[in-house]
Image: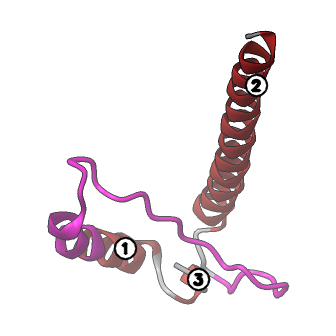
Amino acid sequence: MNKADEITANELLKIQNNLVWNVSPHMATLQPPRLYAGSFWSHPYKKGAPKELLQNQEASLLRDIRDAINKIIENRIATARRFAVRVRNCLLY
């Protein structure tokens, strides 16, 4: 959720809860979706915005993006290794 600094912390919580409640039944998993709230532009936070919450959410989003990229890279490396072993075994026979 972008521009979350435009609303109060209570409004943000209500919006997130409502969104999770409405989206969860359409998900293929039993866990609720992970929502990130922040203000993803170069302007400072609005006065009265829950700055610490938004900063923590933005840091969490960046961490999760980094972890997802690392997981993709690890999977590609594992696939390449499996392929290399298969090719090597084929060449030996």
Residue on which disc 3 sits = 2
Instruction: Describe the element under mark 3 as helix, strand or loop.
Output: loop
Q: Amino acid at mark 3?
A: Asn
Q: Is residue 12 above or below residue 27?
A: below
Task: Residue 9: give x, y in percent of width and height.
Answer: 45, 72
Residues marked 2 and 3 touching at CB (< 8 Å): no
Q: Which residues are magenta?
A: 19-47
- Residues 56 and 28: in front is 28
Q: Earlier in the sequence, mark 2 or mark 1?
A: 1
**Tag in front: 2 or 3:** 2
Is residue 37 on the magenta stretch? yes
Task: Residue 15: give x, y in percent of width and height.
Answer: 33, 79
User: How much space separates mark 2 and mark 1, taking CA atoms?
Assistant: 58 Å
Binning the other alpha carbons within 10 Å of mark 1 as few (below 14), some (14 to 19) or many (20 upward) gives few
Q: Amino acid at mark 1?
A: Asn
Q: Which mark is residue 10?
A: 1
Q: Earlier in the sequence, mark 2 or mark 3?
A: 3
In the drawing, does residue 24 fall left or right of residue 65?
A: left
- Residues 1 and 11: in front is 1
